[in-house]
Amino acid sequence: MKRLKTNTSFILFLLLAVQVSKAQTATKATSLFKKGISLIDTDQQYEKGIKLLDSALLYSPSKSIEIQINFAKGVALNSQGKLSLAALSLQKNIPLINTFGPGLKNKFHANNYRVLGDIYKSKGEPVKSMEFYQKALRYAEKHNKASKAIVLHQIAVLLLEKEEYTEAERYLNLATDQYLNESLRLGKYLNLGEVYVKTNRYIEAEKQYAAAKELAIKTNNNNALSYVYLGLATIHFEEKEYIQAIRFYEQANTLSEQLGTKQTEVSSLLNLALSYAKTGQHFKALPYLKDAETMLGESSSKMLQMHLNAIFASVYENMGSYEKSIVHLKKEAQLKDSIFSAEKNKQFEELKIAYESEKQQQEIEFLTLQKKKNELELFRQEEALKNLTLEKELEGARQENTILQLQQNTTKSENKIALLKKSQEVTKAEAEQSKLIKNAYLIGFFVLLIPLSGLLFVYYQKLHAERELSKKQKELNQQQITELVKDQQLNTIKASIKGQELERERIAQELHDFIGGNLAAIKLQLENFKLDTPKLQTVLTHLDETYEQVRHLSHDLLSKKIKENLFTDLADDYLKSLSASSDLNINFIPFNEHLINQSDIKIQTTLYKILQELINNTIKHANATVIDVNVSASSNFINLLFEDNGGGFEKENSLKGVGLINIEKRVKKINGTLNIDTVLGRGTLIDITIPYKYEL
């Protein structure tokens, strides 16, 4: 008994030790994570910081800490220019984030997708970058306004790099100042200044640079101030005010030298050389070019070296030094040829590093799992050994008790033998009689048992059948209730849409038949008068104009709803009302809204009716829970992507349905194309493309 209590206490102690060990492991992971962040953010020691983050992952941190570790590692790798590895680290977060509730999910996804957008922008993949920014914007809108403003600013920077200045300006203005920190507000003013310079709006550009200058001085941000001077210099350069441009370029150069920012210093030197060359002072341009050449060296950006050699060639040519000009022209040509191959080698190295890193990560994960497996196996072996020892001790005690019991039984048996011998003859006779009675009882029992067993079996089968029937009936009732609810939702939507259309048709008919008819009758009556006077002619003219207005109003009333509202707002309200009144989760994502809303009214009307038809088909047939609607526009096309997670269908057997035929007719009417991607059990994707300008 004492040994049993000792073993139980030991097991409890062991479990407590395991819990303490887990707590210490989690604390160790958090500690390493914080040290890694400090090295990266404060000391810019990226390599050491990343190693500490990798070590933290080995201590099985919580999901929240693991996501933050991957995010910090991705940001650090992005700062180092290791773009493929950075993207790999952030993409590991996506399935982890999806396990959280809405609050943390929106926060983590907004930041994670935004940095992925930054990475692919740096990789020169603007389409992929915009895709991640749009995802970040969707989650940021649900998180908070500050997060949304940051994503809008980053989208504007991407559009600025693509030279889409109108869209960049629109997104910069959407990023409200009050939700941006001082650093991002500075960036916004500088970017707006660049947009205005590129679109030749120099007065507005100067206002933005003035606001940026004030904030840069206030926050003691000399780096931003150097960009302000570069921007102001560019304005004067473009307006051919080269003396003023030189003054601002020199201010930018002075600040860049103090800060040690190589990029802005080289840029100011090159632009100073260009400005002096524009004034004809080529001899003054040469020292700046040579300083820039010294700073760049051979290991710097080939694009900058190519630009430097182009300016050298131009200056030497204007100075009459043709041999030197030709030397720099050859260097420029060689750099152009090498840029392509260098870029390819860089991509190859990034892919190679990404593969090796992923392989190392897999090995680390395997070793971690193997370690946990070995620890668990060792714990099981120790427990098994303890249980075996305890069983042996219990078995020894049982054997001792058995021996004592046998000895007592032997003594009792010897005493009983004498009595048994005396009563053996009497017992034998009684046994014979008892045997006959028992046999009779057994035969009777078996005779009753057989039919009773049959009855019990039949009764059990009946109960089982009734239970199965009740279960089937319950499932059938639930299915009928679900179908009735869906039919009710569909009928409600159809009745609402049909009621609106009928009301518009009734009003149009009343205008055309009653008021138009009365106006025509009044005109006829007035024409019967034989009075050819100017006043009567004026009245008749007004009647004709009124009649024409009524007729046009009756014809246009059906599309008035589209004309009086922005298409994107109308579609958004319609889909939100459907989502609120049903179990559907409908996501509506427009891109280039101003182009969509400026399209032909007939295109908007047809798109709206197609959207209604698609929603009706999904509710009626697809059994979907989520619908994604994307509408985008360019100068040539409008595209509608409609996707649901329903049951799909077989295209060969379902393309003759009334709903799809109606949609196909509407698309053909406006010269569009319709593509359907569906597989039974996988959902449906419908892609509709319509020319932005068309002829019926």
Image (spheres, helix red, strand yellow):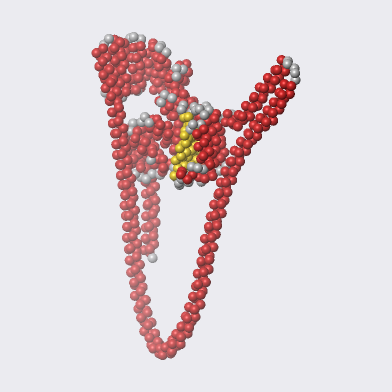
Q: Is residue 266 above or below residue 97?
A: above
Residue at left 52%, top 30%? 603
Residue at left 27%, top 25%? 338
Image location of residue 333, percent across then percent down? 28, 21
**The one of 43 and 613 positioned closer to us in this rendering:** 613
Q: Is residue 477 above or below residue 657?
A: below
Identify the image quadrant of residue 79: top left
Residue at left 34%, top 72%? 400
Image location of residue 599, percent across then percent down? 52, 28
Residue at left 49%, top 76%? 449
Image location of residue 35, percent across then percent down? 36, 37
Q: Is residue 98 above or below residue 307?
A: below
Residue 122 appears left or right of 629: left
Identify the image quadrant of residue 489: top right
Image location of residue 548, percent across then percent down? 64, 24
**The one of 668 and 176 positioned closer to us in this rendering:** 668
The N terminus is located in which quarter?
Answer: bottom left
Q: How many marks?
A: 0
Could you tell me if residue 586 is visible in this image?
Answer: no
Residue 327 appears left or right of 648: left
